[in-house]
C-alpha cells in the first residue's frame, strides 16, 4: 500500500505488515463456512460479506478515534456516547412513519438521528466542568440509555421489540449482494478522515490550542460529526451495531504508537478491519455449521480487552 | 504593532475588562501585572481572539483581528495559555512541528523542517526530541510548548503565566529565553506574570491592571516604585536596588 508510506519507513513497514495480514484474513474469510464453494456463492455472498466486514471494521474504529479527539477523552466511542442507540432510534422512527419507503430514506433517518445525538452529546460534554476521564463516557452511557429506553417504549407499543433488538446485534450472515451496498457510504467518511488526520489531532489538543494554530475549530468539529454519523448509521443499517470496536482499537494503537493521527490512522483502520475479520471467522467456526453473530464475539473479546485497558491506564 | 481600543468584557453582571486601551511596543517585553481577577488573562485571550469581547477592537498591524483569516493571524500572533492539559501521546518533535501548521498544514517543507530544528535547539530539546510529552517533567513540557511557539515564528508572542508550576531554575531559563526572543529575534512579547520580581528584572514595559482597568502603563522603572505597587496590589512593598535592578520585598 504505497499510499500509506508517507510518514516514515518504520510506520510504512508496520502498515505493510498489517495490510498483508488483512489480505490473508480476507482470503480465509472468503472460504470459511457452509455451502459448496462455487463462483456464484462467492460472488453473491462471500465477497459482499468480506467487503462489508472490512469497511465496518475500518469505519467503526475510525469513528471511535474521531469521537475521542472531539471530546478529548479516550473512553468515548459510538458505544459509550449513545451513537449506536441514536441510529437505532432513527431506524425505528423510519419504520413507524414511512414503512416500506426506500433505503435512501431509511439511511437518511438513521443519519439524522446519529448526527443530532452526537451534537447533543458534544454539547453536554462541553458543559461538564470536571472532565473526569471516566465521568464523560458514563454520561454517554446514560445518554444512550435514555435514547434506548425511548425507542424501546415505542417498540413495545408497536410490538416490534424483537426486530429492534435484532438491529442492535451486529450480524454479517444476512449480507448478500444487493442488500449491503449502503456500507460503501463509509468510504467518503474514511477518505475525509484520512485527509484531515492532522486537523483531528489538533482538535484533540483543545479548542484554544488549535485556534492558536489557525485551525477553524468549529468547521473541523462539524466535519467530524458528519463522518461519524455517516459511518455509524450506514454500518448499523447493513450489519447492525458493532460494539467496542471504536473503543479498543484506537486505544490499543494509541498505547503502542502514540496519538499523531497522521502516523497512526492507517494502523487504526487496518487493525480495526483485522479485529473484525478475526471475530467473524471465530464466530463462523466455533459452532460450525451454525454461526454466532459477530456482535457476540466482538462483545466478549472486546469487553475483556477493554477491562485490561482500564486496568492498564490506572497504573 | 498591537493596539487595543476600548475593550470591554463582561461575564453576566461582572465587568472583567472595562474600556481597556493600550499600545504594545514592538520588539519589547511587556508584562501584565495585577491581582487575581484583575483581567490580565482575559485581556490576553481577547487580543489573541480566543475570547470575543463585548466591545472595542483589537488591531494587529493596523488591521482589525476579525478581518484576518485564521491562518494569516496564526502566522503573526501566537498564544500559549497557562493550562496545557494535552493528554495526547505526541513526541516533542511532533508537537513542535505543529507550530508550522499555519504555514504548511501538515505537509512540511524543507524550510519548515529547518525552523523546527532551530526551535528544538533554541530550547535545548535535542536530547529528548523523540520522547513523548506526557512522560516529561513540568519544566521540559513547558519548554516543548515554548519550542512550538518559537517554530510558529510569529511577530507577536503572548504568554499566559508561563512560570506556573516551574521551579526557580526553569523560571529563570524561561524568562531568559523570552529576553532572547525579543533582543535577538526582535519578537514582541506580552506576558502575564504573577511574580513582581520577574517582571521587574526581565521586562521593558509593565502594564498594571486593577478591577478590569489599566491603572498604569509605563517603563519598568516607573512602575517598580513603592507608591505605584501599593496602589496596584494593595500591599506594602519595600524596594531595594541590587545590581541596577530593583527587587521588591513584600513579605
Image (spheres, coloured by chain):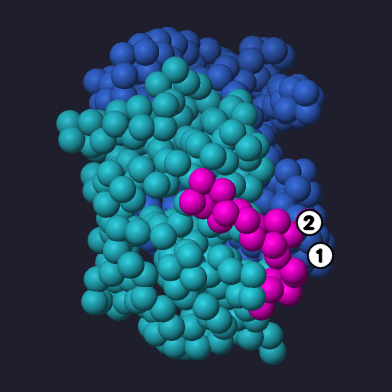
Chain colours: A blue, B cyan
Q: Secondary structure at mark 2?
A: loop
Side of B57 where A304 appears, left or right: right
Work out whether residue B249 or residue A162 is closer to the camera in this orientation and state it.
B249
Residue A15, visible in the rendered structure: no
The label nearer to you, 1 versus 2, is: 2
Tell me residue B251's x, y (percent): 78, 56
Dot label at residue B251 = 2
Q: CA distance from mark 1 to mark 2?
A: 67 Å
Identify the image quadrant of residue B165. Answer: top right
Letter of the chain that mark 2 sits on in the rendering: B
Work out whether residue A95 or residue A216 is closer to the camera in this orientation and state it.
A216
Crowd class of label 2 (few under 14; some 14 to 19; many from 20; radius 10 Å):
few
Crowd class of label 1 (few under 14; some 14 to 19; many from 20; radius 10 Å):
few
Letter of the chain that mark 1 sits on in the rendering: A
Side of A139 where B86 appears, left or right: left
Q: Residue at x 54, y 39 (%)?
A: B172
Q: Say above or below: A191 vs B55.
A: above
Dot label at residue A153 = 1
Q: Secondary structure at mark 1?
A: helix
Q: Say above or below: B172 vs B72.
A: above
Tell me residue A76's x, y (percent): 65, 44
Tell me residue B33's x, y (percent): 58, 66
Q: Residue at x 42, y 41 (%)?
A: B177
Residue B57, visible in the rendered structure: yes
Tell me residue A187's x, y (percent): 37, 42
Magenta part of the chain: B230-251
Side of A271 where A23 appears, left or right: left
Q: Residue at x 57, y 54 (%)?
A: B241
Q: Residue at x 17, y 31 (%)?
A: B110
Work out whether residue A289 or residue A251 is closer to the camera in this orientation and state it.
A251
- Marks 2 and 1: in contact by CB < 8 Å? no
Amino acid at each position: 500500500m504505497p499510499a500509506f508510506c508517507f510518514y516514515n519507513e518504520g510506520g510504512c513497514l508496520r502498515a505493510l505488515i498489517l495490510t498483508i495480514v488483512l489480505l490473508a484474513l480476507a482470503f480465509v474469510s472468503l472460504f470459511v463456512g457452509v455451502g459448496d464453494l462455487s463462483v456464484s456463492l462467492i460472488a453473491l455472498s462471500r465477497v459482499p460479506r468480506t467487503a462489508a466486514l472490512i469497511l465496518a471494521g475500518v469505519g467503526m474504529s475510525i469513528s471511535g478515534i474521531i469521537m475521542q479527539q472531539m471530546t478529548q477523552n479516550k473512553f468515548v466511542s459510538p458505544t459509550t456516547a449513545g451513537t449506536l442507540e441514536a441510529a437505532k432510534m432513527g431506524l425505528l422512527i423510519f419504520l413507524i412513519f414511512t414503512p416500506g419507503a426506500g433505503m435512501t430514506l431509511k439511511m437518511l433517518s438513521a443519519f439524522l438521528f446519529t448526527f443530532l445525538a452526537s451534537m447533543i452529546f458534544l454539547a453536554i460534554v462541553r458543559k461538564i466542568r470536571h472532565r473526569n476521564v471516566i465521568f464523560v463516557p458514563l454520561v454517554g452511557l446514560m445518554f444512550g440509555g435514555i435514547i434506548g429506553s425511548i425507542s424501546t417504549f415505542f417498540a413495545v407499543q408497536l410490538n416490534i421489540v424483537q426486530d429492534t433488538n435484532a438491529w442492535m446485534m451486529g450480524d454479517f450472515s444476512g449480507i448478500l449482494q444487493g442488500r449491503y451496498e449502503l456500507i460503501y457510504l463509509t468510504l467518503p467518511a474514511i477518505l475525509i478522515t484520512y485527509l484531515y488526520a492532522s486537523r483531528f489531532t489538533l482538535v484533540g489538543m483543545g479548542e484554544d490550542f488549535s485556534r492558536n494554530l489557525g485551525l477553524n475549530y468549529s468547521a473541523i468539529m462539524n466535519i467530524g460529526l458528519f463522518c461519524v454519523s455517516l459511518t455509524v448509521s450506514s454500518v448499523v443499517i447493513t450489519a447492525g451495531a458493532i460494539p467496542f470496536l471504536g473503543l479498543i482499537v484506537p486505544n490499543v494503537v494509541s498505547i503502542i504508537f502514540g496519538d499523531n493521527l497522521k502516523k497512526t490512522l492507517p494502523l487504526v483502520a487496518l487493525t480495526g478491519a483485522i479485529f473484525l475479520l478475526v471475530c467473524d471467522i471465530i464466530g463462523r467456526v466455533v459452532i460450525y455449521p451454525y454461526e454466532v453473530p459477530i456482535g457476540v464475539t466482538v462483545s466478549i473479546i472486546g469487553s475483556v480487552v477493554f477491562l485490561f485497558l482500564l486496568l492498564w491506564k490506572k497504573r | 504593532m498591537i493596539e487595543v481600543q476600548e475593550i470591554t468584557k463582561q461575564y453576566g453582571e461582572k465587568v472583567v475588562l472595562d474600556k481597556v486601551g493600550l499600545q504594545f511596543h514592538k520588539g519589547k517585553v511587556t508584562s501584565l501585572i495585577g491581582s487575581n481577577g484583575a483581567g490580565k488573562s482575559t485581556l490576553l485571550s481577547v487580543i489573541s481572539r480566543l475570547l470575543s469581547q463585548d466591545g472595542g477592537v483589537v488591531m494587529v498591524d493596523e488591521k482589525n483581528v476579525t478581518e484576518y483569516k485564521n491562518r494569516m493571524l496564526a502566522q503573526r500572533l501566537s498564544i500559549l495559555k497557562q493550562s496545557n492539559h494535552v493528554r495526547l501521546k505526541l513526541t516533542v518533535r511532533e508537537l513542535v512541528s505543529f507550530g508550522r501548521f499555519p504555514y504548511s498544514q501538515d505537509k512540511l517543507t524543507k524550510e519548515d523542517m529547518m525552523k523546527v530544528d532551530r526551535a528544538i535547539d533554541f530550547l535545548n530539546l535535542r536530547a529528548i526530541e523523540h520522547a513523548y510529552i506526557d512522560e516529561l517533567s513540568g519544566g521540559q513540557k513547558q519548554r516543548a510548548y515554548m519550542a512550538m511557539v518559537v517554530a510558529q515564528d510569529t511577530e507577536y508572542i503572548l504568554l499566559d503565566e508561563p512560570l506556573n508550576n516551574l521551579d526557580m531554575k526553569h523560571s529563570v531559563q524561561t524568562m531568559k529565553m523570552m529576553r532572547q526572543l525579543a533582543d535577538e529575534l526582535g519578537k514582541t512579547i506580552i506576558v502575564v506574570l504573577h511574580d513582581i520580581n520577574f517582571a521587574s528584572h526581565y521586562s521593558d514595559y509593565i502594564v498594571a491592571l486593577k478591577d478590569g482597568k489599566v491603572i498604569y502603563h509605563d517603563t519598568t522603572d516607573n512602575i517598580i516604585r513603592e507608591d505605584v505597587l501599593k496602589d496596584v496590589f494593595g500591599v506594602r512593598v519595600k524596594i531595594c536596588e541590587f545590581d541596577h535592578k530593583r527587587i521588591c520585598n513584600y513579605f
